[in-house]
Amino acid sequence: MIPDFQKIMRPFLNIISDGLEHTTSETNEKIAAHFKLSEEELNQYLPSGVAKTFPNRVAWAKSYFKMAGLLENTKRSSFKITEAGKQFLKDNPTEITIKILKTLPAFLERTGRSKDEGISVDIDNTQSDATPEEILESSYLTIRKNLSQELLLKVKSCTPSFFESLVVELLVKMGYGGSIQDAGRSIGRSGDEGIDGIIKEDRLGLDVIYIQAKRWEGVVGRPEIQKFIGALAGQGAKKGVFITTSRFTNEAKEYHPKNDTKIVLIDGEQLTDLMIDFNLAVSKVNTFEIKRIDNDYFGEE
């Protein structure tokens, strides 16, 4: 299990306690070895998929040490413990936490009150084991999940024709069907044998995809998928997308036709996730950017 960033603090400072210069990659390897982390754990990503969890947590531990004056950069991706850091280790033999770091004069000076502006800048997170970045990502995922659930209720309440149009617009936003006009002329034409529409796979129309789009209340089982595959075979089609506002049984998801027909199953949760990703029926309220120092600007090597 990957330790939280506060549990990383003590072994981190122990590793660099020799006063020598250490690199980020070397320190990460030693900390990983200390906690006996597996390759799978080392390759685990944050929910956003942008950064790996373990090095992100080590980076936050390092950041707090710098704010507390216990560590200093020597050059790009290299650092060493300060004299204050060495003394701190002597005085605190058991554990290191943000709560303890916040008692240090250097930490209070850099993150406490601004004498000129009278503003209290509190970056402390003593009540949580998560890094500020992890808290932000977790909050984002909660907001997104709530939005997805609300969106699915809206989709389920719309008319069949509106749902059909929604599916068309989503597929076009994803790069299929060419234009809305082209896609609209194709969708909804079949309406029999378990096929609700046909859409171009690309703008040139080199291939087509057959669609079944159903506002379903019950769980979609394997028999429905088999009917759809049979309908594709009847049309001589090889590619299909089955979209439902409900969900699929495990038997349905695990079913694979013996011929070379390829089908994609999209349930209600995946549908709303795609709608959010491709900005369909949702609007942007706020954008937050996470930024880091550009060491190249300062000429650090």
Image (spheres, rainbow, N blue to C red):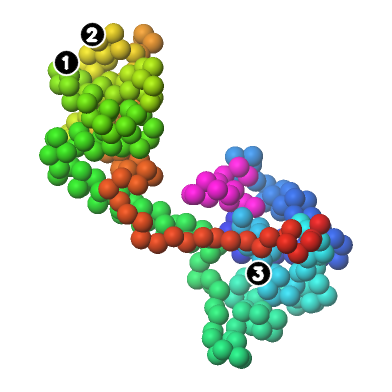
Q: Is the residue marked by circle 3 packed among few (<14), some (14-19), or many (20+) residues within 10 Å?
A: many
Return the disc, 1 or 2, that comes first in the chain's sequence.
1
Label ID, residue 211: none
Stretch of the chain drawn in magenta: 42-55
Residue assigned mark 2: 234
Secondary structure at badge 3 equals helix
Percent x, y of residue 142: 37, 56
Residue 85 as seen in the image, left or right of residue 169: right
Give the residue type that dot 3 points to: Tyr
Q: Quadrant of residue 239?
A: top left
Q: Is residue 56 magenta?
A: no
Percent x, y of residue 143: 36, 57
Residues at discs 1 and 2 in contact (Cβ within 8 Å): yes
The residue positioned 38% from the left and 26% from the top of the image is 203
Q: Which quadrant, please, contains the C terminus?
A: bottom right
Residue assigned mark 1: 193
**Camera-side residue of 7 and 261:** 261
Give the residue type that dot 1 points to: Glu
Residue 57 as seen in the image, left or right of residue 267: right
Q: Is residue 221 visible?
A: no
Percent x, y of residue 123: 56, 74
Give the residue type that dot 2 points to: Gly
Return the disc, 1 or 3, that comes first in the chain's sequence.
3
